[in-house]
Image (cartoon, rainbow, N blue to C red):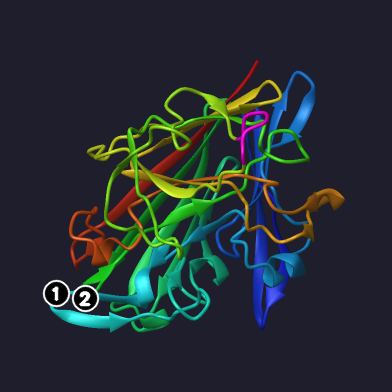
Amino acid sequence: MPVVAWGALGDATIQRIGLRGGDLDVSILTFGAAIQQLRLHGPNGPRDVVLGFDTCAEYLDSRMYMGAVAGRFANRIAAGRFTLDGTAYQLTRNENGVNHLHGGANGFSRKIWSIASVAESAVSLLLVSPAGEEGYPGTLKAECRYSIEGERCLRIALTAATDAPTIVNLATHSYFNFDGEGYIFVHRLEIPADTYLPTDDALIPTGAFAPVDGTFDFRTMRAVRPANAPPQRYDNTYVLGASDGHVRKTARVESSRLGMEVWSTEPGVQFYDGGSMRSVTGRGGQKYGPHSGLCLEPQRFPDSPNQPGFTDCALHPGQVYRQITEYRFDVA
């Protein structure tokens, strides 16, 4: 299976790993454990389904978390502060100098992961995050395993262990566009959630669980933005509930005779409509900008260390954090 040197960050080499199985081929980067390319081979030839860049330099320059694993704590923590087992911690405040976002200024998405094992259709990547990095307690050892299962399923298994009490919330951050170009408004989306987490203007959850009735309702598949509908911003966590460690259907998205179901163990999924994407040139010369891709990020709830009614994100020595997310594709 091809593993090639693709670029460098300082003195460290960034590698690209090619995986192939069934109707899928995938390119994985050791930078951010990112999905650089994901192609589905169908009756009309291969189709790219995620956004990405052509060069290593573009990934190093971007702050869009393009295809990466976000952590040590994905999403937001209000003011970067939390208390764990009676001890208060201050994390980096990398979002407008106010809140902590996706693990900090140099979180997991900015790190070079090491290759633990690689085969034709699977790769395991490792990362050690030392105590104190971005303000987090405990040395955390994380693993990300990508594997192609069957003909059209990409599985992402995330695990982590710590030597001291800490918090963990990992999420995958691929931008999907099944049309190959343009906006994602005509993509049809289904999320089987009755409630979501409303937020304040800084996208910090208020602590409430609100019914999805109205513009946030995707229980029945519909267009992301139906024709003639007013603009609606989507960057919220949909509440799915406990799964007891088993994957269950989290979302489905369709466009251009291509469908994908997201299955995951996680209690929530963040639906982000790409509204804050910067205008850049992407893979193959495509022009990316606001709403060029959508993200479906299974995860625990944002700001959960500060919200008593939210999912527990604490990890203690002897425990193992586990998450499984699967992208299951079908072609009409």
Report crowding for label 2: few under 14, some 14 to 19, many 20 or more residues within 10 A (C-alpha): few
Amino acid under disc 2 = Thr
Residue at 66% in and 68% down: 14
Indicate the position of residue 186 as horizontal and vertical percent values.
Answer: 67, 31
- The answer to whether residue 20 is left or right of residue 100 is right
Residue at 37% in and 76% down: 79
Indicate the position of residue 57 as horizontal and vertical percent values.
Answer: 76, 70
Residue 83 image label: 2
Secondary structure type for disc 1: loop
Residue at 60% in and 25% down: 259
Q: Is residue 112 visible?
A: no
Residue 85 image label: 1
Report crowding for label 1: few under 14, some 14 to 19, many 20 or more residues within 10 A (C-alpha): few
Q: Main secondary structure of the magenta part?
A: loop
- The answer to whether residue 114 is left or right of residue 19 is left
- Height in image: 319 above or below 51? below
